[in-house]
Image (cartoon, coloured by chain):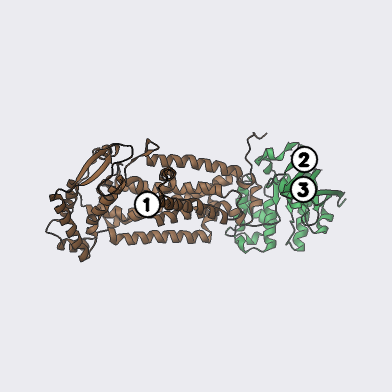
Amino acid sequence: MQQIKFEIKKIMCNKLFLISTAILIGYYIFMIISGIPMYASSPKGNAKFFAQAPESPTSQYIYELEQEQNDMFEFVFIPNDPPYPPGEYGSTLMEDYNIISNYTEQVRYSQSTFDRDMTLMVEKLYDEMKNAKSSGNNYIYRYNEKAISIYNNKIDIPIIDSKNAKGSFEIFHHSRESTIFSTLLIMWSAFISAFCYTSESTYKISNNVHSTPNGRRKLLLNKTAALTIIIFIMCFAAFIVEFLVSVFAFKVTDLFVPIQATPHFQFSGFRLNILTTMILTNFMRFIALIFVVGIVSVLSIKARSLIRPMILSFIFFAGASYMLMVIISIHELKAVNIFSVVRMYFPLALTQPNDYLTKFDYGNLFSFPANRLTVSIGVFLISFSLCIWISSKFYGGGRLRWKKES
Amino acid sequence: MEKRELTFNNVTKKYKDITALDDFTATLEPGIYGLLGPNGAGKSTLMKCIADIIRPTSGSILYNGKDIYAQGAKFRNIISFMPQDLGFYPSFNAMEILHYFALLKNVKLDKEQINQTLDNVNLSEYKKKKVGGFSGGMKRRLGIAITLLNDPEILILDEPTAGLDPEERVRFKQLLADMSKDRIIILATHIVSDIENLADNILFIKKGKLIDTIKGRD
């Protein structure tokens, strides 16, 4: 335990760690602050909006809007396996979902604006949807059988003051979807891991340290434990911030509302409330960042400074991922499909936890139905264990020995 | 007590085209051994091989008849290595450094013992000072304190007196002389006077080869 404390101190006293953490926290606060006017509702703002809206009680108006949308959607069962029949508006199942959800989101989020023009747009959309319904144009939602069975599995979604439930959760929605924040998180974890594993080389103390009995495998494990603790503290702090902001800005009882009451998660197959989802999403981020620690421990083997593992981390995490996205968008190659499936289950995707919870719970992994979250965590456990095992064999001048020591 | 003996059997270390150690063979018993040789002779390479920082390309090193690399952490428990390039974590103070290394060396030290150790190397008044602000001589003295923490059977010292003032150098030599009765101490230095007054045996190394071995202060 003492050794872990020293490893934590080494990391936290480093100026670059303090700067990188400040940047990360600063960006996170920026996202929260920019999220507040976008997603939150204040009584004052709502009073202004609903004064301009058709005469209707506040929550009843929103409820009516939602009911209209629900009435317009037709549920069609489709087989589990691709190819899925094309949608009315898009060529794939997920495109249909994205188009429809974007359309409905405009209506749902209108309650958070105080702008007169936005109010008029909402009213126009409301009229448009009513006209569409009366002329018989239905939007078609296609689900696979497993997802719909979960969705229909007796989830009671009460008629609530939905602006509060939505606001208390959606205020952090962007942080769970943002690619920039996800990349910042990954690179921050890579940086502190690279620094931690190469600190002996950086400070020219490696010969001294690695010639001691506890200066190799045990030291590596202590460093890994120290990094785990630091990352846990950051994720826990993020959860506390979400919780406190939600409690002080909105009602505490809203935290126990099912996430299906919020627009982004209305088709989620998970039986979760907003509070447990906050805990789960921060835990998922934690898993992803610990995965980064494991990978960097291998990339840091024999490194003489933190430059090499940082460059390799960038290539491995950011470079490969973005290259793949470019390839996928430009070409429709059969091999790329395999990569995109792998990427979907890769633990790094856990830094954008919304993806796991908003869309259908079950996917197809090479024709096997698989819970995506379970597979990602399983991949993490195996890969992390393997990484630590490999790096402990080579850390500090050790050699991979296949023969037992005498 | 078991006789302590460190044996080098045809130890060779090659780095691509460079042969740092060439068929080095010797047997060391308790006493002080001075390593003398020009720059690039292989002194540091030999020391790193003993400290298990690097491995020879061929040959073996035995301690009391057992291969030191097969023993692993067990062997590292009884050695202490002070390299030529001595660095420390700048944000730690002297007490923390000693405590940290005590943990690495499996040594239990209380505050009193840490204070005593710092006193032995004349660093008591700087115990709370961050090591980043230490002079070269102070770092060397701290390095010496770390080396002696685990009461090692084998001491490997690369330029231990570099940066020390004359008084400290004398003090250090006396300390080594007191310890040498039942320990193997291997000392590499460019300061010939340190070796000729201190070492029981002097090993001359050139281009990785052991050229000659002569008796020292006796």
Q: Which chain is brown?
A: A
Which chain, by letter, is green?
B
Q: Amino acid at mark 3?
A: Leu
Q: Position of residue A229 (x, y in %)?
A: 47, 49
Residue A184 location (% of width, % of height) = 44, 56
Mark toward the start of the polypeptide (3 vs 2) = 2
Residue B4 seen in the figure? yes
- Residue at numbered disc 3: B21
At label 2, counting other C-alpha atoms closer than 10 Å, the crowd grade (few under 14, some 14-19, many 20 or more) is: some
Return the chain for callout 3: B
**Label 2: chain letter:** B
Left or right, A215 with reference to B46? left
Query: Which residue shows up at 69% across the image and 58% down it?
Result: B141
- Hey, which residue is sitting farthest bottom in the picture? A116
Spot occupied by residue A91 in the image (x, y as percentages of width and height): 30, 47
**Kind of element beneath mark 3:** strand
Q: Quadrant of residue B193?
A: bottom right
Whether residue A252 can be seen here:
no
> Residue at horizontal 70%, vertical 50%?
B81
